[in-house]
């Protein structure tokens, strides 16, 4: 009996030491907030100018975006800086020793992905300028891995989460200014047929920003219910103004999950299930239908079946794959092909984007990955990504995983700056919170060093801490 008490006291003392030694590791959510700020300010000067007030539908003119000058590169500069910073930050001290094997495996996988993605450029007839488009989304993926790993391993204090949310709330409030100007410039009579970009380059990006901020609000559980609710309400307003159906559905679903989670301590589990299925879910469906109808996007099925729709494009994909040879099928046409950045490069070079084999904007992450890597390269890429995400999968992150799955089949996720960062940070924060102790990330770091499956040990983590 005495030995049990002594063991319990020792365990408590170790946990206190872990928390004390990691007390000042608050940089993860701060970095996330600054990355969001950099992305939001990219075209802010255009949005607050006369060109911003004159936008009528969907996006700014390319000529107006060019007037933003060097500010348009602030997002890429922030990604590059953070891409260099996070490996250095996590390679020092205790984290560095625990993550040594992880860094070796991650670097090996990233180099293999880069090699497989350049086969068409080096040994085939790939269109070399598109390589820069591929390197750009690989940099975003690398930065997202860093955000997720920092949130997962380092301690996320309540103060840092609250500060990040206040920063995002400020960005959302700032975005309402050009939104109001654009709305007044177009006239209230046209409100239901507009897709307003706010201070983003187009309405689609504004919608993805709204989803990303909502994911961050849902996952920042230590920040308090008030800033989380306020950020979600602002996100829903921006998503509805953008007319992005994905944003409206995802925001409403996350708000419902936040409400049910907030009522968890007040309601019995059975009653909470009945409340969710019988009341919240029907209200969610009605609200989504009403908001989507208000945005005037038309019949969703008819749009997808019409020319240029996602379902219609599947036939185009089948025809394009038929143009490829066995090397294309196995290794793809090179990283960057089929991306929005490649489309922009083609326009800048005054060439027909579809003249490059398999360069199709399909709004589907899985198919776009296949265009770039082929069957073999896609297998290597997705398997490595699965082992990166596997430690972050838990029951509490179900709603984020559902939104992520929906995003994979509605657009090319790896090009979406805000979504990539938010999903990485959100899954890591929810997983760390599920462990039930703020400093448990160091225990996760030690399991990373063993690689693969032992990176995520439910028996040693979730059973030890309820949640």
Image (tube, rainbow, N blue to C red):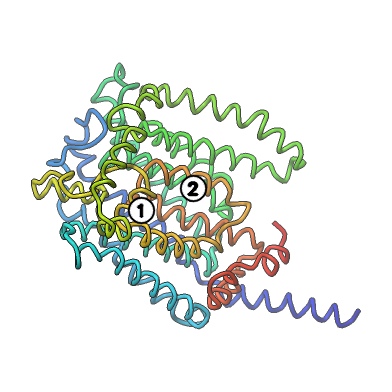
Name the residue rendered at 25%, 29% in the picture: 57
Residue 280 is situated, as x and y percent measured from the top left of the image, at: 62, 31
Nearest the viewer among 416 and 257 is 416
Q: Quadrant of residue 12?
A: bottom right
Q: CA distance from mark 2 to mark 1?
A: 17 Å
Q: Nearer the viewer, residue 390 or 45?
A: 390
Q: Can residue 265 be seen?
A: yes
Circle 2 residues within 10 Å: few <14, some 14–19, many ≥20: many
Residue 325, x across and y down, in percent = 25, 54
**Quadrant, the C terminus:** bottom right
Q: Residue at x 45, y 55 (%)?
A: 164
Residue 67 visible to the viewer: no
User: Is residue 398 shown left or right of residue 179?
Assistant: right
> Does residue 371 sit above or below 354 in this rendering?
below
- From the image, state whether disc 2 or disc 1 is nearer to you: 1
Residue on which disc 1 sits:
414
Q: Residue furthest left?
A: 350
Using the rendered view, name the quadrant where residue 270 is placed.
top right
Q: Report helix, strand or loop for mark 2.
A: helix
The N terminus sits in image quarter = bottom right
Residue shown at 25% from the left, 47% from the top: 340
- Number of numbered discs on residues: 2
Q: x, y (%) of residue 69?
A: 15, 52
Question: Closer to the N terminus: mark 2 or mark 1?
Answer: 2
Judge by depth and name the residue closer to the eye, 24 or 302: 302
Q: Residues within 10 Å of mark 1 (few under 14, many from 20)?
A: many
The residue singled out by tag 2 in the image is: 215
Mark seen at residue 338: none
Front-lying residue, 451 or 324: 324
């Amino acid at each position: 009996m005495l030995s049990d008490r002594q063991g319990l006291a020792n365990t408590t003392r170790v946990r206190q030491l872990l928390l004390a030694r990691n007390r000042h590791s608050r940089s993860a959510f701060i970095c996330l907030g600054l990355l969001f700020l950099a992305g939001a300010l990219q075209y802010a000067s255009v949005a607050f100018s006369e060109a911003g007030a004159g936008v009528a539908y969907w996006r700014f003119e390319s000529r107006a975006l060019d007037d933003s000058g060097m500010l348009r590169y602030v997002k890429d500069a922030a990604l590059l800086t953070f891409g260099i910073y996070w490996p250095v930050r996590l390679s020092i001290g205790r984290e560095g020793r625990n993550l040594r094997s992880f860094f070796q495996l991650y670097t090996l996988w990233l180099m293999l992905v880069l090699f497989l993605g350049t086969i068409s450029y080096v040994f085939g007839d790939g269109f070399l300028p598109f390589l820069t488009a591929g390197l750009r989304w690989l940099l975003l993926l690398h930065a997202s891995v860093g955000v997720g790993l920092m949130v997962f391993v380092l301690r996320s204090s309540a103060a840092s989460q609250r500060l990040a949310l206040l920063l995002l709330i400020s960005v959302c409030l700032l975005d309402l200014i050009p939104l109001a100007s654009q709305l007044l410039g177009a006239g209230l009579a046209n409100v239901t047929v507009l897709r307003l970009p706010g201070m983003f380059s187009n309405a689609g990006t504004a919608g993805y920003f709204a989803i990303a901020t909502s994911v961050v609000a849902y996952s920042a559980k230590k920040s308090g219910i008030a800033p989380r609710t306020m950020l979600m309400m602002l996100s829903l307003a921006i998503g509805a103004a953008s007319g992005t159906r994905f944003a409206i559905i995802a925001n409403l679903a996350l708000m419902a999950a936040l409400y049910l989670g907030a009522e968890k301590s007040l309601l019995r589990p059975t009653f909470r299930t009945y409340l969710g299925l019988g009341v919240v879910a029907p209200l969610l469906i009605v609200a989504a239908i009403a908001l989507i109808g208000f945005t005037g996007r038309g019949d969703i099925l008819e749009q997808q079946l019409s020319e240029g729709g996602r379902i219609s494009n599947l036939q185009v994909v089948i025809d394009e794959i038929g143009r490829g040879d066995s090397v294309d099928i196995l290794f793809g046409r090179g990283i960057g092909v089929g991306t929005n950045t490649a489309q922009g490069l083609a326009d800048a070079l005054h060439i027909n984007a579809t003249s490059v084999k398999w360069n199709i904007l399909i709004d589907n992450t899985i198919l776009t990955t296949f265009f770039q890597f082929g069957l073999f390269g896609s297998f290597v890429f997705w398997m490595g990504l699965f082992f990166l995400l596997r430690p972050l999968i838990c029951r509490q992150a179900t709603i984020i995983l559902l939104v992520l799955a929906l995003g994979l089949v509605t657009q090319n996720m790896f090009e979406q700056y805000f979504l990539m960062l938010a999903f990485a940070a959100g899954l890591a924060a929810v997983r760390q919170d599920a462990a039930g102790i703020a400093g448990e990330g160091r225990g996760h770091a030690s399991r990373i060093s063993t690689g693969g499956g032992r990176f995520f040990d439910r028996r040693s983590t979730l059973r030890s801490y309820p949640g």
